[in-house]
Image (cartoon, coloured by chain):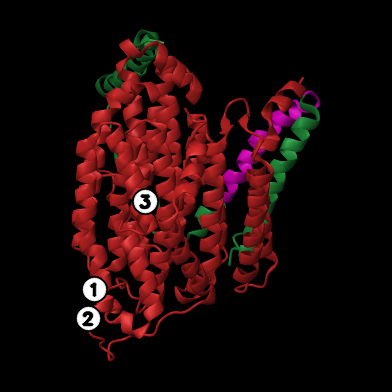
Chain colours: A red, B green
Amino acid sequence: MFDNLIAGMHVGRILPEIVLVGVVLLAILTDVISPRGKSTGPVRLVSLAGLIGVLVATILKKDDFGQAFGGMVMIDGFTFFFRVVLTFITFIIIYVSEKYIGLAKIRIAEYYLMLLLALFGMMLMVMANDLLILFLGIETMSICLYTLVGMSRHKASSNEGALKYFLLGAFTTGFFVYGIALIYGSTGSTNLTDIMVYFRTVNTAMPVIAWAGVGLILIAFAFKTSLVPFHWWSPDAYEGAPTTITAFMSTAPKAAAFAAFIRVFYVGFGDLSSGLEPVLWWIAVLTMTVGNLIALRQDSVKRMLAFSSITHAGYLVVALLTWEQMGASAILFYLVVYAIMNIGAFLVAIAVNRDESDEKGYSYEDYRGLGFRKPILAFAMMIFMLSLTGIPPTAGFFGKYYIFSAAVKSGFVGLAVIGVLNSAVSVYYYLRVIIMMYLKERDEEKEAPIFWAGEMVSIMFICVVLVIVIGIKPDWLLSIAQASVSGLM
Amino acid sequence: MTPNDFLPVLITFFVVGGFAGITLIATHILGPKRYSKEKHDIYECGLDYIGDSRKPFSVKFYLVAVLFVIFDLEVVFMYPWAVNFRHLGLFGFVSMGIFLVILTVGLLYEWKKGALEWE
């Protein structure tokens, strides 16, 4: 009697996730059988090999698209795109971490295990076609992130960030679940396709509880993507977390949250776009502006990057607001570009930072005269800063260009103008790093040694190359992004 | 569905709230009041209490509690599975096998990390 059920499940379509779970179990066993205190090396190798296996499985299944598990998950070009991106980011973070976690005194295998499990949660998020699966994915990811943020147990800032993130995150979970309950109460389903059908038919007389549900889910997403006014956790969590984790959190979970955001609001709530427009308009304006204004006043590069990551989320909301394929593909393009330049910038920050055990650290002062001291490292940082600002010929320029042109074409001229003005403001704090590096005199007495690790240097190099290559020739990435969102609407 | 469909839920809400409220008020008004030292003790059955309850205690208790919850839930899933074993056939067997493998790896991990050692 279960034959039909099994045939309808299409278990093969989630092969990458099955492989990933196998990798997690293998990594745990590796940790268990390795001698105490020496397990991080083997666990890291198992994780890296396993992630390559996940990539291979993803590519093997790249033509087997469709729903699986009775419509609970949707495997399409969009899922494929994010599976590859998220696996790559996790691979890079695990690859560069080994020497850093020794420096940060968190040399425990759980660091890698949590990253792998967070990746599993994110994979669930990007393929969820049902609010409950999405909820599972968000929780799996978040619980891993709470522990990763608090990994530096001996640091007060790490504990503070983790506790804040955990308490607010748990509270937001309540909002999300209540939103799902209200949506279910009014539409009779948690499936995004069914929800879309319902909203299409009763568009004129939407019950209030359905709107309340949509609003609560919007709040939950705003929290996960750190949009103003739900952003207060992110600077503290980003500052307290080990810096490799900050690089991870500002790229992969943000990409996964935006992917789920796009799917829920384009597929499930697609017909409510006119009603949601003013809300998202204000969220976009506030997120861009507030993130920028606070970033101006930071003395720590790590904190500056945290606040600027809020601003970048604001740009992404501008593109989301267009409610068109053009906007969605601009988001995908931007997420990839942002991941490349942000990971690069955080790696330079790790290399330059004076003292990892310092509670604050990551001061602008550490960059004084770096252009004369370590010209190549300073050049890499300059490229990342220019790209984050959005100056051609770097990848960041095209990321912003596609977003704002999508906004203008959809009639959001005012929003595009505010966005460009905000980009101009951000020049101040990004260029401050470059000024420190090239226009300030060296102060040799205060200089701290640079933290070098071979794997970090190689990733930095690849990031610089990619930023420049995409900056000169962005079409291929854009066409991949466009192909990925084409099946969505 | 319309909001009217939730009328039963609303009625239940008021019935539950009303019952709790009325019971509290009624016992407060109607119940006899005889105060004594025993009446004000924490354990009204007569046991003498020792010390304050707001004492820090070892995190190991939490570990045991968490472990208990995991394996308690395992049994919650296994019992209906075992009852319907014939009915579920190979599909059920494989599903439960995967579930148990994952839990067993977790158990090995706890064991090795010393969560089961008391001192």
Q: Position of residue A386 (x, y in %)?
A: 32, 63
Does residue A409 lie above or below A439 as drawn? above
Q: Chain of mark 1?
A: A
Q: Main secondary structure of the magenta part?
A: helix
Give the CA separation, mark 1 to mark 2.
Answer: 7 Å
User: Magenta residues, as a range?
Assistant: B67-87
Q: Which residue is mark 2?
A: A440
Please identify the quarter of the rendering in which residue B71 is found. top right
Is A284 placed left or right of A31 in the picture? Answer: left
Please identify the quarter of the rendering in which residue A5 is found. top right
Whether the residues at callouts 1 and 2 have beta carbons within 8 Å, the answer is yes
Q: Earlier in the sequence, mark 1 or mark 2?
A: 1
Whether the residues at callouts 1 and 3 have beta carbons within 8 Å, the answer is no
Residue A396 forms part of the magenta stretch: no
Give the CA separation, mark 2 to mark 3.
Answer: 30 Å
Q: Position of residue A214 (x, y in %)?
A: 35, 27
Q: Position of residue B6 (x, y in %)?
A: 38, 12
Is A81 or B99 nearer to us in this picture?
A81
Q: Which mark is residue A435?
A: 1
Q: Secondary structure at mark 3?
A: helix
Q: Which residue is mark 3?
A: A398
Kind of residue indicated by mark 1:
Ile
Is A346 placed left or right of B117 in the picture? Answer: left
Asked if residue B20 can be seen in this view, the reply is: no
Kind of residue indicated by mark 2:
Lys
Residues packed near mark 1 inside 10 Å, few (<14), some (14 to 19) or many (20 plus): some
Q: Earlier in the sequence, mark 1 or mark 3?
A: 3
Residue drawn at point x = 77 percent, y = 35 percent: B93
Q: Chain of mark 2?
A: A
Residue drawn at point x = 40 percent, y = 22 percent: A183
